[in-house]
């Protein structure tokens, strides 16, 4: 490997990785371990209020990569989509208020009882186009994130970097629209290296976790980097070959394991793994 | 839709869909409902013995599309791969003995503790090349089946029709190597229609089930066609546009639902759905 180990200044830990904490506890745990970068989970911010959240982040000197997650624009119902657009404009304003560089944005999935995947994808694309002016005015970028095909039914109707690249091409707003790359969602794709090369100028965020050999849940059983089957360092190498030099963002959804542990243990282990598995 | 409804003579029900039955019970249930096509599950055949299995199939007048599932050739350990090749040669002979047209063949996954996806894929490709002469001599085709990315870790390191097409191209043995297309594995892929057009001359088998909005297991929670989010008829339309006119094969892995029901109810419901959801 030709890449450099990840040092503390390039390490980001997403707030959702410490779902067991409230807003303040999670941020204090990061700060205690010298972590300076995070991404904020919307529900946590809503629990405490945007102003108070911004104050805590400022007091602790934490940089916010992103607010997670916006989007959810794929409904076949125009009223649902209109409501989602209003929500997203509010979330963009929240992101600006906490100085987040981007909102991680997912298309939303197929609704229960629906089977028209292409229509859902096109609704989401149209919704993103409608959000671009507001995001531009707020100075917040929209980081479109393809998710794993196993959550196509309820989270994201785009599942590969290739599909995300195509959508970005249609949106044609490179000053606002970019990509969030999540290794957990994409590691299985043999075309990933080539698609990342094409995506290179648009990559805003790089999320990592690990795929566990015995995966027990389609959404909430992600592993700690180094515990599973993803070569996160190789994927980073591909990103850096294209010019990416941003932080590595650890985002672990784990309701049966890491969300049950002492948050300081979780952060300490991530910091250790940064030198070996990221 | 321009496709014709599926009539009973084009309906195939895989033995594994009736996992609750022994070999004979499952086949008798199909015959009772006028189903004339099946695909045999290896473990069920081993339980009863190849000769006895062949006799039951003959007595009941059932045509066997495939034996399921061979392959498992992706290990990094040469001894494991050698053992797998021996197993596959035996399975090919079993398939010939029950007049199966093909063996559904999966690459195998990444082993626990391994992260080199490309190496696993290349091991599998090499193993398939070694099996081609034996399959040719036996008159059994190898139906390479890409599986859903969520089982990349333990079942298949190829996950799209595109990746399967590339592997078939490398193997360059079109008289022996073909494809099994499973809607459950592939429905999320926006490039599916184009990839199926390219794959058309090589498609041997078409498996269907449905994706459930609330999926509780990465392998064994498939739904009955019509109960979920896959437009199986549209996928069949794409296949038929490329010249495919084989049966539609219902293959449902469902340890929490369909494998617990009366097998005659399962078969009856599939026959009903053939006219509406396939």
Image (tube, coloured by chain):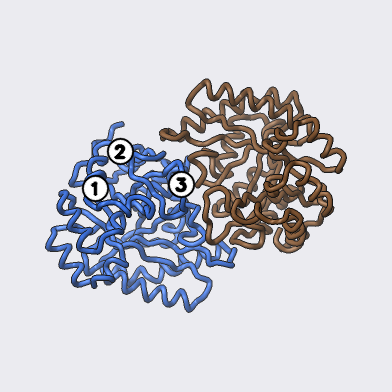
Chain colours: A brown, B blue
Q: Determine crowd level at label 1: few under 14, some 14-19, many 20+ residues with C-alpha closer than 10 A.
A: few
- The residue under the point 76% across, 55% down is A264
Where residue B160 appears, x then y in whole percent? 46, 50
Compared across the picture, whether A45 is left or right of A87 comes to right
Compared across the picture, whether A21 is left or right of B165 comes to right
Question: Mark 3 vs mark 1: same chain?
Answer: yes
**Which quarter shows the N terminus of chain B?**
top left
**Alpha carbon separation for disc pair 3 and 1:** 22 Å
Sequence order check, earlier mark of 2 and 3: 3
Sequence order check, earlier mark of 2 and 1: 1
Where residue B118 appears, x then y in whole percent? 55, 62
- The residue under the point 76% across, 62% down is A272
Q: Which residue is mark 3?
A: B215
Q: Nearer the viewer, residue A264 or B76?
A: A264
Q: Which residue is mark 2?
A: B277
Sequence order check, earlier mark of 3 and 1: 3
| Cβ–Cβ under 8 Å for marks 2 and 3 | no
| Cβ–Cβ under 8 Å for marks 3 and 1 | no
Q: Nearer the viewer, residue B208 or A173?
A: B208
Q: Tell which subunit mark 3 falls on.
A: B
**Alpha carbon separation for disc pair 2 and 1:** 17 Å
Q: Which residue is mark 1?
A: B265
């Amino acid at each position: 490997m030709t890449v450099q180990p990840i040092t503390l200044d390039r390490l980001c830990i997403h707030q959702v990785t410490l779902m067991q904490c409230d807003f303040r506890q999670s941020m204090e745990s990061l700060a205690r371990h010298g972590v300076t970068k995070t991404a904020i989970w919307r529900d946590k911010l809503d629990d405490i209020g945007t102003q108070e959240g911004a104050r805590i982040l400022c007091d602790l000197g934490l940089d916010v990569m992103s607010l997670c997650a916006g989007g959810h624009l794929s409904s076949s119902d125009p009223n649902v989509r209109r409501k989602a657009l209003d929500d997203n404009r509010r979330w963009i304003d929240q992101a600006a208020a906490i100085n987040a560089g981007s909102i991680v944005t997912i298309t939303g999935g197929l609704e229960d009882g629906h089977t028209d995947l292409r229509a859902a994808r096109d609704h989401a694309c149209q919704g993103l186009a409608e959000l671009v002016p507001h995001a531009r005015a707020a100075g917040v970028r929209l980081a479109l994130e393809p998710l794993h095909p196993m959550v196509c039914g309820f989270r994201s109707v785009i599942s590969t970097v290739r599909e995300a690249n195509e959508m970005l091409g249609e949106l044609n707003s490179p000053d606002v629209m970019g990509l969030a790359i999540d290794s957990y969602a994409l590691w299985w794709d043999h075309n990933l290296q080539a698609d990342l090369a094409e995506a290179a100028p648009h990559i805003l965020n790089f999320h990592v976790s690990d795929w566990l050999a015995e995966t027990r849940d389609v959404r909430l059983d992600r592993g700690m980097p180094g515990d599973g089957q993803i070569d996160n360092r190789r994927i980073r190498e591909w990103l850096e070959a294209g010019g990416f030099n941003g932080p590595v963002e650890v985002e672990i959804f784990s309701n049966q394991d890491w969300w049950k542990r002492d948050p300081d243990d979780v952060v300490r282990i991530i910091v250790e793994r940064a030198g070996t598995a990221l």
